[in-house]
Every structure is written in structure tokens, then in C-alpha cells.
């Protein structure tokens, strides 16, 4: 099973790299597959690669579901 997470592009770097923010965690990822990504776009990240852009509303819904899941799992 593969899991791809939505993350917001916060900085574009040389050589088709970008810094993305996922819940306060910033990570350097490849944007080779999404070379039109811009700052504030949401992209789907899997193993260090942006696979595609995602609508901001859909990204927020997905992130909210992950937060809800984490909350449920932390309950005894």
C-alpha cells in the first residue's frame, strides 16, 4: 500500500526541487514530475517526489481527515 500526502509548496529551489510544508514539517522534495508547481500550490508527495498538484480545498479536506484519524488513534 502506498500513501501520498498533500503538502503546500513554500519555496522553489534550483534543479526542480522545492521546500514543502506538511503540518509544520518542512521537507525538500523533487518537483521533476510537477515542473509547473508554484509557491502556495498543494502537491501530493510520495517518497520525496511531488506526483501532481491537488486542489487546495481537497488538500485541506484530506489533511483534516488525517488529523481526525490521528486524534482517534491517540484515544485509549
Image (cartoon, grey):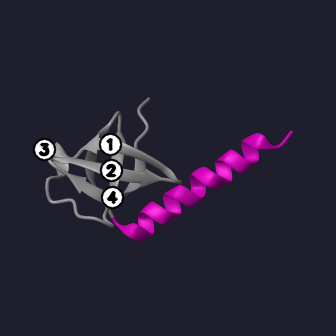
Pointer 4 residue? 9
Residue ranking furthest to the top? 1
Residue 15 bears which disc, if any?
A: 3
Is 46 rendered above or below residue 52? above
Tell me, yes or no, whether the two marked residues, 4 and 1, touch with CB atoms within 8 Å: no
Res 28 label = 1
The residue carrying pointer 4 sits among few (fewer than 14), some (14 to 19) or many (20 or more) residues within 10 Å by Cα, namely: many
Answer whether residue 34 is magenta in the image.
no
State the SS at label 1: strand
Q: Residues within 10 Å of mark 2 (few under 14, many from 20)?
A: many
Q: Is residue 47 left or right of residue 70?
A: left
Q: Which residues are magenta?
A: 55-76
Give residue 64's quadrant in the image.
bottom right
- 2 and 1 marks in contact (CB < 8 Å): yes
Task: Name the residue nearer the viewer: 62 or 17.
Answer: 17
Q: How many marks?
A: 4
Q: CA distance from mark 2 to mark 4?
A: 6 Å
Amino acid at each position: 500500500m502506498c500513501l501520498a500526502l498533500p503538502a503546500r509548496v513554500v519555496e522553489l529551489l534550483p534543479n526542480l526541487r522545492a521546500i514543502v510544508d506538511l503540518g509544520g514539517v518542512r521537507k525538500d522534495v523533487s518537483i521533476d514530475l510537477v515542473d509547473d508547481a508554484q509557491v502556495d500550490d498543494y502537491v501530493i508527495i510520495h517518497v520525496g517526489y511531488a506526483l501532481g498538484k491537488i486542489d487546495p480545498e481537497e488538500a485541506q479536506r484530506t489533511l483534516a481527515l488525517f488529523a481526525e484519524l490521528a486524534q482517534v488513534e491517540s484515544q485509549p
